[in-house]
Amino acid sequence: MASLKRSLAVDSHGPNMSSKVYVRSTKNGKVQKIVRELYLRQDIPCSSKLCATCLSSAPADSNGNILPFVLSEHPAGTKAYPQGHYLIPDTNALLNGLDLFEQSSAFYDVVILQTVLEELRNRSLPLYNRLIALTRSEEKRFYVFFNEFRLETHVTRESGESINDRNDRAVRRSTKWYSEHLQKTVYAAGRTNKCPAVVMLSDDRENLKKAKAEGVTASSLSDYVSGLEDADRLLDMIAAAREGQDARAANAEMLYPEYYSLSKIMTGIKAGTLHQGVFNVSPYNYLEGSIQVPAFDRPLLILGRENSNRAVSGDIVVVEVLPREQWKAPSTKIVEEETLNKNENADNEEAEAVVTEQERKALQEEVRKTQGKSIEGRPQPTARVVGIIKRNWRQYVGHIDSASVSLTGKQGRSQNTVFLIPMDKRIPKIRIRTRQAAELVGKRVLVTIDAWDRETRYPVGHFVRSLGELESKAAETEALLLEYDVQYRPFPKAVLDCLPKEGHDWRVPTSLEDPGWKGRKDLRALLVCSIDPPKCQDIDDALHAKPLPNGNFEVGVHIADVSHFVKPNNAMDEEASSRGTTVYLVDKRIDMLPKLLGTDLCSLKPYVERFAFSTLWEVTPEADVVNVTFTKSVIRSREAFSYEQAQIRIDDATQQDELTKSMRILLMLSKKLRQKRMDAGALNLASPEVKVQTESETSDPVDVETKQILDTNQLVEEFMLLANISVAAKIYEAYPQTAMLRRHAAPPRSNFEELANQLKVKLGFDLKTDSSKSLADSLDTCVSPSESFLNNLIRIMATRCMMSAEYFCSGTQAYPEFRHYGLASPIYTHFTSPIRRYADLVAHRQLAAAIDYEPLDPSLRSRAKLEGVCRNINVRHRNAQFAGRASIEYYVGQALKGRVIDEEGFIMKIFSNGFVVFVPRFGIESLIRLRDMAVPEPPSVFDADSYKLSVQLPDGKDQREEITVELFQKVTVRISDEKEESTGKRKIRLGLINAKIGGPAAASAEETKTGKKNT
């Protein structure tokens, strides 16, 4: 390859021209001189409303409008800057203190230099995105100044100068120019006492030293914050200082192994001796992690702190497989950090060891245990982390360990070192320093991890803010939104400006000559209706069916035409793309789109005309599709039914109106479509489905009930699936490289090994996993006449063995990989919910172009851009599901608060020191630990081969009663509530009352032997 040398100089062609001179030697040895010229301007405004000079000469946009100036003419003052001040942070200040800049109590009128913005983007894309959001906030007044293109602030890199030093010099130059520029214009106006100070913020000591020498007003973050009113709280938000850490590290004992060099990692991955993947921590054992890599059928186990080597759950890591003699079996024991490492002193870093004595004993017990023949008992490949490719650190929600506060023994406003215990048990304790330790006890707290060095046992972070009291509805709801990175802030003004000016008064144009009608079919005469959950306001879809003269049926699925209102690449589209999906909680909905669209103008409400995107089929009485067409349309829904209302109307023989007959046709066809899918191998899986009843005014939980699945639920599901499959085929035909599709990969056979062995050993069932068809058929045989719920339980467990479905761009996969395993469909997309899913909006735009309704935006022809969209919406979709489940879990806990209920449950997982019970009525599962059953923890015998745990419980007469619990066993449990010490959450507590040994495990096994099993 040609070598490239670069030198920079300001060319002498003119004062407004900067030349970059590149000297390159080519392959044949010749030297080429390449000159890149940059035009520097003097009309880029400072954007201060105090500056008459910039106001009079500011450039206008294409419409002749001068963009409004951002920086206030009355900026806030402090003790150090009583005349008011503007702030110019360097990259270092933003990396260490972006949480500060987001605060509402301070940090207004901030100039973000182009140099800093670009450097931050290279250093941390999440922080860059947060900063961009601040620049869009009218309230915060953050102004992006293009210093690289203004003559007076442009800086050329000097010979031998590092890029970092050049960027620091650019920040100092811009700060000095701003100060001199404002003084000149303000003094010229005769307002000598009105000129604000321009303050450079930096945590780089060398940069501050040079600023002082050059006469630039500058301050460190901590010095600046110390002069603010809310200093104690704000100082806690500065990232953990690294000053002096290197010196301490030199004298400290290294607890963790050093990571491999980047070159060694790359060489090892290429050679196949190292492997890369996502590090996941077991929810039952914080000392056990795993990583799935293509080279191994089963996950690689990572046991103990030393082998996990500072990896946090979700990090992309590089691992090295240990020698075969060091391979271990997965843990059969519940290991929780709060029981092993209670009352640790957060200040006592010097006395730390990477593994505590309690953890060492727990690991040794696991190593000594007898290896059985069960799947869990087999040793499997074990590895250690040797490098981190990408940290998945985010903001974490938790609570302050009160023991760590009392152990510090410090009083007053000095900084105390305390532990934050995250809500997510897979995340290690985080050591933070705070001046508010006493006030934060009992609060839900948000923190950020700053570093995890080799010499510290736990990661180090800083306080961001308090969310409120533990268990309060507001704090716990915000906590789960933050925990799953749900974007819940109000829509910014730029997004709301994209809404129709008519607001709620917008109507479908009355004249068919209006441009809004161009290319649309008038389907207002069709008997269309919607069927949704009760109180649904964002109605995405509606249906109709009618007989045709030839004996077939016309069936239509009509979807809200969101793409008419949300145009590509505007502020609303960017916001929707970022949010990815609407998030449904028990008491609220976090919308992807503003409510004006989601619950009104786009929603297919009854009795009003709405724009739609319609899929129309001709279908035979046997539910075979004869043909399909797609069209933009206008519809008028006749009714909005809930599932229950629609079912009642269909079942009422006295109802013989045309709309009811239409729904009966839809139901008849949906059952045949469903049977065709099942015959093709589609899976009928299950998940815990409960509904929390709340008071209408307060949203306080009242009761919990299991969701009932009606025929009308399946009616809607079948036609939505048919529409999605039909649209997928059409957009892939039109755009084979960039169609937005959704796939569900076939799970590796190893995913089902454990469940298959459990079913064989305990129930005598044979789970076949050769294909989705064989899996579906074998699941159908897993039934017990004596216990109807058993099949549902097995389906829930089978669902957890599956891969996650994902959005993808068609050009990134071979066609056989498009297949949706669960639906047994060769191709699939999401089209039917554009109000609440961004993927559907993309599919709408591609379908509109495929039918020549409108041209396709160039952004939707870019595979790279669509791949980025897919990555984001896959994460957002998954997080939305987790947030929804967490909301249900919280409200179920609140609904049962103070109550004691006896219910039946099923054992779905067995450990050597406890077991997991699933309670169908409430859709909950919870651990029952042996230490919860008696104190001290009762002796027990765990048989891993037969999934059986025998426990000797005291009977109160100095004797012991032995009880045995087995996998799939039906038990009676006492449900109460407790505040979980480790997470601060109110959780369901289960206590074992009665174990019915003659439950489904025994019955089904016996039925299998005698051939009486009813399938």
Image (spheres, rainbow, N blue to C red):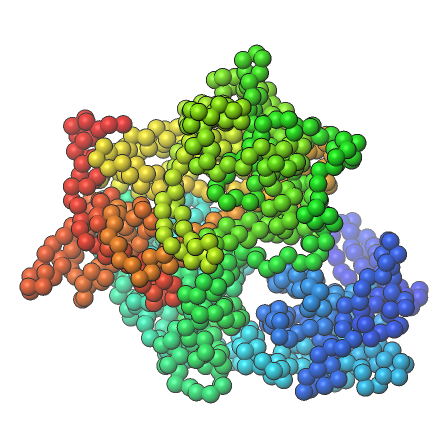
Percent of width and height locating residue 659:
53, 27
Percent of width and height locating residue 605:
59, 39
Whether residue 726 is visible here, answered yes or no, is: no
Residue 958 horizontal side relative to residue 917, left or right = left
Between 909 and 623, the one nearer to me in the picture:
623
Above or below, 612 relative to 868: above
Above or below, 717 relative to 25: above
Above or below, 809 relative to 962: above
Whether residue 353 is visible here, answered yes or no, is: yes
Picture quadrant of residue 930:
bottom left
Picture quadrant of residue 549:
top right
Picture quadrant of residue 1015:
top left
Residue 935 horizontal side relative to residue 69, left or right = left
Residue depicted at x 51% and y 19%: 624
Between 105 and 823, the one nearer to me in the picture:
105
Between 660 and 708, the one nearer to me in the picture:
660
Residue depicted at x 90% and y 68%: 56
Above or below, 78 relative to 524: below
Residue depicted at x 45% and y 75%: 440
Residue depicted at x 21% and y 35%: 786
